[in-house]
Image: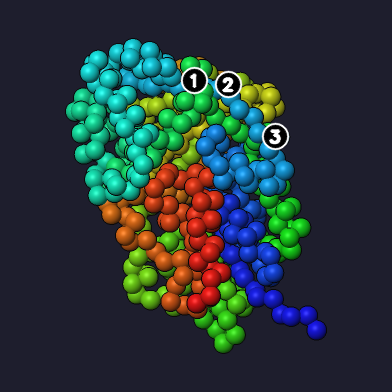
């Protein structure tokens, strides 16, 4: 008689849930339960104007060692493409080149001393051994210390607010230091030609399909379109209940949802665990994707210093090329907002109209080249690294036997991206499988 294998449910089928399921699959019965009709989470893809590409923008950096190991493991190393792409910086409606040190020194809206201190700030961030040393320092305080008043007021603060909005005053310097360190790495790789970024041919559709096939071959089961509302203790283990009222029982459950959602989903958590989950501050995102008749600009990213409905301009076609997009251009216009921002409940048509109006103020002829538009809204995307954040993390192992919480809230010294997400899985897995 075959020995009964331990059963695990992984609630959430994003990259994090898929990686955890892969690690758990050896010697265990594993089921991924995902509310969407497909796997992928924030890395999922969609169809826009007949072109399938990523719902949100993603790149691979040469130092993304975990991502590169994953791609190697699933046989996609040969499909990684590397390119150097320039960047731009908008001020008062004009877009200036901002790739090389010479171009940055030529930016007309900053004085020479401010530009020099900008460079010193980036160098300082790149050599930090432990970004958590800055965890008790507000981001704006650290920037003023290193960049001075002019560069902070005219450059850094608009960029910080574009990413963190009203949460900017809550963020520690860890946020800006880790962001700068990541971008500095890309700049060194690209050299004078621009930021050195990589992507997988076909986008994350290629990656997710290969990950799903690998999971299937490992015996992992998948339930799609099942929104979980409750994970609670039952007589035979942990009972997982879906929105339609159906339920299944497992020996162990790992919840990868955003911490506030996990707290509501798991009523048996201790009060202190619930408080830690509820205490994580998240940014949401409203992102407009525009499929165009061709690339809009040569810049992969254009930093925006003037107010716009969106907070940056990402031209994916500048990186991947029109051939990856059936000859089209693809632009992302993200707006990072608080998770309770009214924009998240706004009508898509209103968002499209407003964002396109803003884009035409920079590119007056763009409207005639728009082929299709789609809006993505996610309430909890980016955990904000608030002051002293690492001392208030939700637990991986909870007081409920067999219940584990693993989410992006566990990122303490990096910015949210696939590589950091894989790092969360790497650190959490030993805690999940160790004996009590």
Q: Could you give the CA–CA distance between mark 1 and mark 3, rounded to whole angstroms?
A: 23 Å
Q: Nearer the viewer, residue 71 or 379?
A: 71
Q: Residues within 10 Å of mark 2 (few under 14, many from 20)?
A: many
* Residue linked to disc 3: 79
Q: For the N terminus, which image quadrant?
A: bottom right
Q: Nearer the viewer, residue 35 or 82?
A: 82
Q: Earlier in the sequence, mark 1 or mark 3?
A: 3
Dot 2 lies on which element? loop
Query: Which quarter of the figure has residue 143?
Result: top left
* Rendered residue at 58%/43% (across/down): 67
* Residue linked to disc 2: 295
Q: Could you give the CA–CA distance between mark 3 and mark 2, rounded to whole angstroms?
A: 22 Å
Dot 3 lies on which element? helix
In the image, farthest residue toward the right: 1
- Residue 191 is labelled as 1
Q: Could you give the CA–CA distance between mark 2 and mark 1, rounded to whole angstroms?
A: 23 Å
* Rendered residue at 58%/24% (across/down): 83
What colouring does the structure picture have?
A: rainbow
């Amino acid at each position: 008689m075959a020995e009964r294998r331990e059963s695990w449910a992984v609630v959430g089928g994003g990259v994090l849930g898929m990686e955890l399921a892969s690690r758990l699959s050896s010697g265990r019965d594993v089921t991924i339960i995902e509310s969407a009709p497909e796997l992928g989470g924030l890395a999922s893809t969609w169809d826009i104007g007949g072109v399938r590409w990523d719902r949100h923008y993603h790149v691979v950096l040469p130092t993304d060692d975990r991502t590169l190991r994953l791609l190697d493991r699933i046989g996609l190393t040969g499909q990684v493409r590397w390119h150097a792409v320039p960047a731009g910086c908008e001020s008062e409606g004009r877009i200036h080149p901002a790739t090389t040190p010479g171009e940055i020194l030529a930016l007309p809206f900053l004085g020479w001393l401010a530009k020099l201190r900008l460079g010193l700030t980036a160098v300082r961030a790149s050599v930090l051994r432990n970004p958590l040393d800055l965890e008790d320092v507000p981001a704006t305080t650290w920037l003023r210390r290193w960049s001075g008043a002019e560069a902070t007021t005219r450059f850094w603060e608009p960029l910080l607010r574009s990413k963190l909005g009203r949460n900017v005053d809550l963020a520690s310097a860890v946020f800006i230091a880790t962001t700068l360190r990541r971008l500095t790495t890309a700049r060194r790789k690209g050299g004078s030609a621009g930021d050195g970024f990589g992507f997988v041919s076909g986008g994350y559709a290629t990656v997710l399909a290969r990950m799903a096939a690998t999971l299937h071959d490992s015996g992992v089961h998948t339930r799609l379109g099942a929104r979980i509302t409750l994970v609670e203790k039952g007589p035979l283990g942990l009972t997982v209940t879906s929105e339609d009222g159906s339920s299944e029982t497992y020996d162990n459950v790992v919840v990868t949802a955003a911490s506030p959602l996990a707290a509501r989903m798991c009523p048996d958590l201790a009060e202190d665990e619930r408080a830690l989950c509820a205490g994580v501050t998240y940014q949401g995102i409203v992102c407009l994707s525009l499929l165009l008749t061709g690339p809009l600009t040569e810049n992969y990213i254009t930093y925006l210093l003037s107010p716009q409905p969106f907070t940056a301009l990402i031209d994916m076609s500048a990186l991947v090329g029109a051939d990856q997009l059936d000859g089209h251009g693809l632009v992302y216009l993200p707006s990072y907002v608080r998770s309770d921002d009214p924009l998240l409940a706004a009508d898509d048509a209103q968002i499209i109209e407003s964002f396109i109006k803003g884009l035409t103020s920079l590119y007056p002829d763009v409207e005639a080249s728009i082929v299709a538009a789609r809006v993505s809204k996610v309430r909890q995307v980016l955990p904000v690294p608030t002051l002293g954040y690492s001392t208030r993390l939700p637990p991986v192992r909870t007081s409920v036997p067999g219940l584990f919480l693993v989410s992006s809230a566990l990122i303490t010294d990096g910015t949210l991206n696939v590589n950091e997400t894989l790092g969360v899985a790497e650190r959490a897995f030993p805690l999940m499988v160790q004996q009590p």
